[in-house]
Amino acid sequence: MRLFFLSILLPLLLMLYPSDCHADITDGMVHVFLRRLVSEYPLEIDMNGAYTSQDGTLWFASGTHLVASVQETQIYLFGNGFTINAGQKVTLTRTSTDENTYLLLAGGSNRYAGDLTLIIENGQIKPIMALELEEYVRGVVPYELGDSFPLETLKAQAIAARTYVLSKSGAYDGYDVDDTTNDQVFRGRSLNSPLCEQAVRETAGIIATKNDLPAVCYYTASNGGQTEDGQHVWPSTTPDAYAYMNVKDDPYDLANPSSPVRRFILQSVPGNEGLNSELQAVLTSAVAAVSGTETSPMLPEQIRIDSVDAVRLETPRYPGSRIMTEVVFNLHVSFRSVNKTTAPSSTLTTPHPSDTAQPDENTLENITYIFSEFVPQTDSIEITIPFFGALERSMGLSINSANNELLTLYSIDSAFVFETRRYGHGVGMSQRGAEQMARAEGKNYEEILAFYYPGLTLKKISYSQQVREYPQSMAVYPSPRPSITPRPTLMPVSESGLEEGWGLAEVTNIEENSSLNLRKEPSLSAEIIMRLFKYQQVVVESETDDGWSKVHTDVISGYVRSEFLQTVQNKTR
């Protein structure tokens, strides 16, 4: 989300309030839909520190490894030696707000220091994380920017991210934001980004406000040298909803060598090889459309582009915008005439690819074309072509799927140079512009924010952090630990669904207290998705020549080594 460009000589319009001026936030909790993890099935959960279920009926000691999966309409939690039917919803709650109480999810190393709620939605697990505001921001800044950016840019990013999530409070049913670019990228806390951590710590609680409320601080990767008006991207019925985010030039983004730009050079005399086949087709089709008649349409194959005399950009999408939607070409061309003849199909002539008429099935004749020589035309031809679509693609100038690149045109020697810029929606702060302001211009985060969000006020908020008191004795293993491990609950397997060629087997040839790795692919280096206990029954779908079996239960599927399975008699089809 991005915005740009006040004169650097203008006074700052964004004021930093004294640190003792606070806006009150009730609990400071953010609810994040972990959309990226929906595809992680089953979901692995590792606990550092003790957790309990929300109702206090389940307790998990630090070091517990869980696998969450769905069977029909129920969530099952599989652990080392136990299986829990958690129903249709379960919340794993931290027993301490200490930063060392966190979850690792989907086998990753990033820390999710919050409460995790699992809900069934459309047959899948929908994970929602509730965590304290500053902990959330720590999980955003390294993934929206990262330690390669200057500290002051990271501070501006931290404030924009903090403000954005507060402005989105309660935006969705059951959560505030998701963890993708739909809102802000959130991946949990990493310990490999010390500069990002510093930026969050040194701006703790600071947000940008409008009328004493958190502003909607959109930002974008690169605006291409001009900010976009929020009303153009997200129309609002409130007239001044984006009054602090409008169209203006941004020299900082434009000057940053890391801002994305794509370039196409069109020679004024392209010659036989000067136009790629796609651009050739776009230009000749446009010429054919204005040169033929209704009774005598012209084919693109009748046209040769001899020279490009002039090019200009027209029709900005909005007043003052550099999103130009049309390109006007003045061309000198040559035409050639064409005659159609028909011949029996036995002559092996091939229908011309431009002809849409089909051969007469009764006469079995094919149409062939005889072209004359090209004749240069005295007068030039002017054609107007929409930029977004075939023309942009033919020049390789597409950056955004949103078709909102800024287009510029200039001449060098005997060529026309087209350039496109902008990566993202262009509204609010440009991350590349903010980088340039800090790195090349020495601007601090207040100056960066004042440039991109003029008229907003910085305030420091406070909130009461939750205090949790749980009997910690419930969250540790009793001592001494039992010497005999209870027999684990095994996963169900439905025999009624056996298909032709499938068989029923059970895990054998391992120790009583051992387990068999269920892998994602038939390879010893493949990811382990679960551990199967002895006597677990599985359906064997197929076997590979190198000793792997593809198996499934009612809960999960994967691959195991065939030598650890034994066929259950009379259970094949």
Image: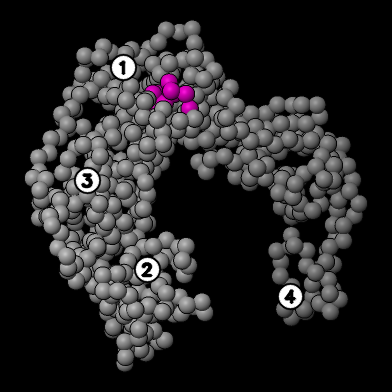
**Crowd band around label 3 with a 10 angstrom C-alpha radius: few (<14), some (14–19), many (20+):** many
Numbered disc 2: secondary structure: strand
Tag 3: amino acid: Gly
Considering only order in the chain, which callout, 3 or 1, is on the residue closer to the N terminus?
3
* Display colour scheme: one colour
The dot on residue 49 is 3
Label 4: few (<14), some or many (≥20) within 10 Å?
few
Q: Main secondary structure of the magenta part?
A: helix
Mark 2 crowdedness (10 Å alpha carbons): few <14, some 14-19, many ≥20: many
Q: Quadrant of the N terminus?
A: top left
Q: Which residue lies at the image location 49% right of the left edge and 11% below the top edge?
A: 8
- Please give the label number shown on residue 457: 1
Q: Few, some or many C-alpha atoms within 10 Å of disc 1 (few <14, some 14-19, many ≥20)? A: many
Secondary element type, mark 3: loop
Is 309 on the left-hand or right-hand side of 254? right
Between disc 4 and disc 3, whose residue precedes? 3
User: Callout 4, which amino acid?
Assistant: Asp
Bounds of the magenta segment? 149-158
Judge by depth and name the residue closer to the eye, 84 or 71: 84
Q: Quadrant of residue 74?
A: bottom left
Sequence-first disc among 4 and 1: 4
Q: Which residue is mark 4?
A: 360
Vertical order, 153 against 39 (above or below): above
| Residue found 70% across the figure and 36% down from its top | 264
